[in-house]
Image (spheres, grey):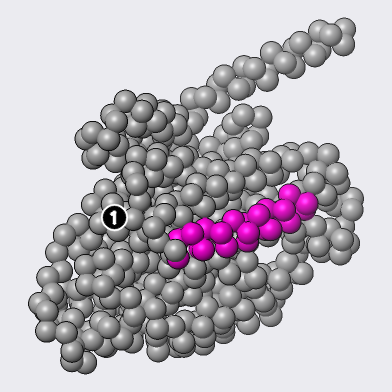
């Protein structure tokens, strides 16, 4: 009888695993493209160097098309989803939307990388570079879908390990090697803390599946401040990936030392995946007792400290990419305001802001990389007078910097407004002072950020250049910047309510 029950359960599990394969078709396409690139790199023998990036782009287009098609189905637009592979991942609308973002920004990164002189001159071969990017995209997909603590950790490592390699890919650049070493050290430390916390959670609940009712029951049976400390240990991996305090130390060196197309990619894609995983984690754990108010206070302190530290240090930066790196740290503090609401509105505002942030930050890093590669400009003061020779560059700089600051009529203003409204609505409901402190911190830090964001376009427009060499802002980076400028301006002027409502339907049933 026991043998029969075991065989029946095994058969059910095998049937579930088999049916789950159909839910990861975009991921199978990315994995298949990865394998195709490996074979192509082995057989091409340094011939046709542009073959690999375009094969990767084709694969990502197919993957993104499948994700878009799945996102348009009735199941996803209703906010529903399915648990796949015995609850390891959740196939839902929020995950599929993030897949679209990851595939889109990866396509742009492959395009820019294929024509980057820095990558060509400072590395031996670009074949492995494009292969590693595909591996990283696959990890990003699983990060946004993981609902099991083990899968969360594995997906995070699937992103982190390729990140270390890509940071150090320009072997002839000493900054890249130093940045990669620091990246590995900080990543290993945060991963160790996260694993330690996960091991305690498994010992307490007897399961790693966040959607399993036994998980919530196990946490409720323990309670107390030790449980709060264990959850904090588990959050270390998430905090590290989004680049928030106190696991932010890797960001400035990595964003400065990595190849500039990859620095642009790091600034948006892993951060978005980290927030997606963080939202899913908080949506699936209970918010009663010690995991309620203390966690809210913790996130409030983390949010204010992150945005304040990032902005104050950015004020003192002279290097363009390091300034943007500390800006990225501050942005993580703003986005945490939406997460700490623990509501559908808060999560929808977070997804909206991450969408806008992708266009703003990615373009800003590409522009910084273009200035370095084409004009040798590394410092903010060296951009003086560029508007005279490259007016489009100056206009784009104004647009993206104003949007990153959060001023109208840009989408950055709308994004911060939605985060603020989500926090204010939740404050009216439960009156938690941590939410009010976070919102006040957001307003104060927005004013602080004005002094370094607008420093860049002001030097371009209002100061004279000592360099008489003519500037021609043309190539692939200007085209991509112009494309991304459209949503940044359009969503700041045209009605955006439908988009917010769409995001609300995606996160409505985030608890699986």
Q: Which residues are magenta?
A: 175-197
Q: Magenta residues: mostly which secondary structure?
A: helix
Task: Report the residue at 69% width, 13% height from top.
Answer: 11
Task: Report the residue at 65% width, 34% height from top.
Answer: 87
Up the image or down, 204 lies above or below 51; here it is below
Residue 280 horizontal side relative to residue 417, left or right = right
Q: Is residue 183 magenta?
A: yes
Q: Which residue is mark 1?
A: 121
- Residue 83, position as x, y percentages in the image: 60, 34
Q: Is residue 268 magenta?
A: no
Up the image or down, 165 lies above or below 342; here it is above
- Residue 505, position as x, y percentages in the image: 48, 50
- Residue 308, position as x, y percentages in the image: 56, 82
Neighbour tally class for label 1: few under 14, some 14-19, many 20 plus, Cα within 10 Å = few
- Residue 49, position as x, y percentages in the image: 24, 39
Residue 147 horizontal side relative to residue 142, left or right = right
**Nearer to the camera, 480 or 14:** 480
């Amino acid at each position: 009888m026991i043998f029969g029950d075991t065989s029946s359960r095994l058969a059910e599990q095998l049937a579930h695993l088999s049916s789950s394969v159909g839910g990861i078709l975009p991921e199978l396409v990315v994995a298949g493209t990865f394998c195709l690139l490996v074979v192509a790199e082995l057989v091409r023998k340094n011939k046709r160097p542009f073959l690999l990036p375009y094969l990767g782009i084709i694969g990502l287009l197919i993957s993104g098309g499948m994700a878009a098609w799945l996102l348009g189905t009735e199941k996803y637009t209703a906010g529903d989803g399915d648990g796949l592979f015995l609850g390891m991942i959740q196939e839902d609308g929020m995950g599929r939307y993030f897949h679209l973002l990851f595939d889109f920004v990866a396509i742009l990164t492959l395009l820019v990388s294929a024509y980057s002189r820095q990558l060509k001159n400072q590395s031996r071969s670009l074949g492995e570079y494009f292969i590693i990017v595909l591996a990283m995209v696959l990890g990003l997909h699983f990060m946004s879908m993981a609902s099991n603590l083990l899968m969360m950790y594995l997906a995070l490592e699937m992103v982190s390990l390729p990140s270390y390699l890509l940071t150090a890919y320009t072997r002839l650049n000493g900054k890249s090697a130093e940045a990669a070493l620091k990246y590995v050290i900080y990543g290993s430390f945060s991963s160790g803390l996260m694993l330690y916390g996960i091991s305690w959670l498994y010992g307490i609940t007897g399961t790693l599946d966040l959607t399993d009712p036994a998980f919530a029951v196990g946490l409720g049976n323990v309670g107390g401040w030790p449980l709060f400390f264990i959850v904090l240990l588990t959050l270390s991996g998430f905090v590290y990936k989004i680049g928030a305090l106190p696991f932010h130390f890797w960001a400035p060196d990595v964003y400065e030392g990595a190849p500039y197309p990859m620095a642009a990619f790091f600034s948006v894609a892993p951060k978005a995946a980290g927030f997606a995983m963080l939202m899913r984690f908080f949506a699936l754990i209970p918010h009663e007792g010690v995991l309620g108010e203390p966690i809210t206070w913790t996130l409030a302190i983390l949010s204010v400290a992150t945005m304040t530290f990032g902005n104050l240090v950015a004020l003192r930066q002279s290097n363009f990419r390091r300034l943007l790196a500390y800006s990225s740290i501050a942005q993580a503090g703003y986005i945490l305001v939406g997460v700490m609401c623990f509501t559908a509105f808060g999560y929808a505002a977070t997804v909206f802001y991450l969408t806008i942030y992708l266009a703003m930050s990615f373009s800003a890093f590409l522009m910084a990389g273009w200035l370095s590669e084409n004009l040798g400009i590394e410092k903010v003061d060296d951009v003086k007078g560029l508007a005279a020779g490259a007016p489009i560059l100056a206009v784009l700089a104004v647009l993206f910097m104003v949007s990153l600051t959060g001023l109208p009529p840009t989408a950055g203003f709308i994004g911060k407004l939605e985060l603020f409204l989500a926090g204010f609505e939740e404050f009216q409901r439960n009156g938690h002072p941590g939410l009010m402190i976070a919102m006040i911190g957001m307003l104060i830090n927005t004013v602080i950020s004005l002094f370094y964001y607008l420093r860049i376009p002001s030097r371009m427009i209002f100061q004279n250049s000592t360099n008489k060499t003519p500037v021609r802002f043309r190539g692939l980076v200007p085209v991509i910047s112009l494309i991304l400028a459209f949503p940044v301006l359009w969503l700041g002027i045209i009605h955006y309510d439908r988009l917010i409502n769409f995001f609300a339907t995606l996160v409505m049933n985030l608890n699986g």
